Amino acid sequence: MAIEDVKRYFQQWGVEDRIQEFDVSSATVEQAAAALHCEGKRIAKTLSFLVEGKAILIVAAGDARIDNQKYKAYFHTKAAMLSPTDVFELVGHPVGGVCPFGVKDGVDVYLDASLKRFQTVFPACGSNNSAIELTLPELEKYSHYRAWVDLCKGWE
């Protein structure tokens, strides 16, 4: 199971015990916010796309949506989300639990500017009923992000 992979991944920093697991689903922003008793915009959702035949992940605030024009200007291609089967195969996590931790080699992670308004955010941890609260410096460190980007719209 992918959550076990994420727990092993976090062991290198000794933070695996900070992962929260719920008795209810946290697969959507709304479900995660309810499970965590927080605002949906603080959920750090991880979106998966295909760029030049390779998977990339964009971590964005729960209230943000990909702006297709910004995406195309940055990646020089149209936004094409991965299918659920491709997500698991190329990234290593199932839909509903996709996160930027413990992903397969070659998957680049980008952090969206929509997250910068928060001191802490809640990304998933490899399953549809898990999350971890991280500061932005922790998210940067643990995700091995490639760059901060401004690819979203619709957030405050």
Image (tube, rainbow, N blue to C red):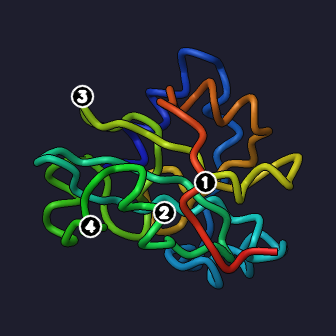
Q: Is residue 75 left or right of residue 125?
A: left
Q: Amino acid at mark 4?
A: Lys
Residue 105, which numbered label? 3
The quarter in which the C terminus is drawn is bottom right
SS assignment at label 1:
loop
Badge 2 element: helix
Query: Could you tell me how far apart the alpha carbons at marks 1 and 2 are, in whole angstroms?
Result: 7 Å
Q: Which residue is mark 2?
A: 70
Pointer 1 and pointer 2: residues touching (CB < 8 Å)? yes
Looking at the image, tell me whether mark 4 or mark 1 is earlier in sequence order.
Answer: 4
**How many numbered discs sit on the rendered protein?**
4
- The local secondary structure at tag 4 comes to loop
Under circle 3, the secondary element is: loop
Which residue lies at the image location 34% right of the left edge and 59% below the top edge? 48
Q: Could you tell me how far apart the alpha carbons at marks 4 and 1 are, in whole angstroms? A: 16 Å
- Between label 4 and label 3, give the one nearer the viewer: 4
Furthest residue to the top? Answer: 12
Q: Nearer the viewer, mark 1 or mark 3?
A: 1
x, y (%) of residue 102?
39, 34
Q: Amino acid at mark 1?
A: Asp
- Name the residue that disc number 1 marks: 150
Q: Is residue 99 left or right of residue 132?
A: left
Disc 4: CA contacts within 10 A as few (<14), some (14-19) or many (>=20): some
**Sequence-wise first label, 2 or 3:** 2
Quick one: label 2, few (<14), some, or many (20+) residues within 10 Å? some
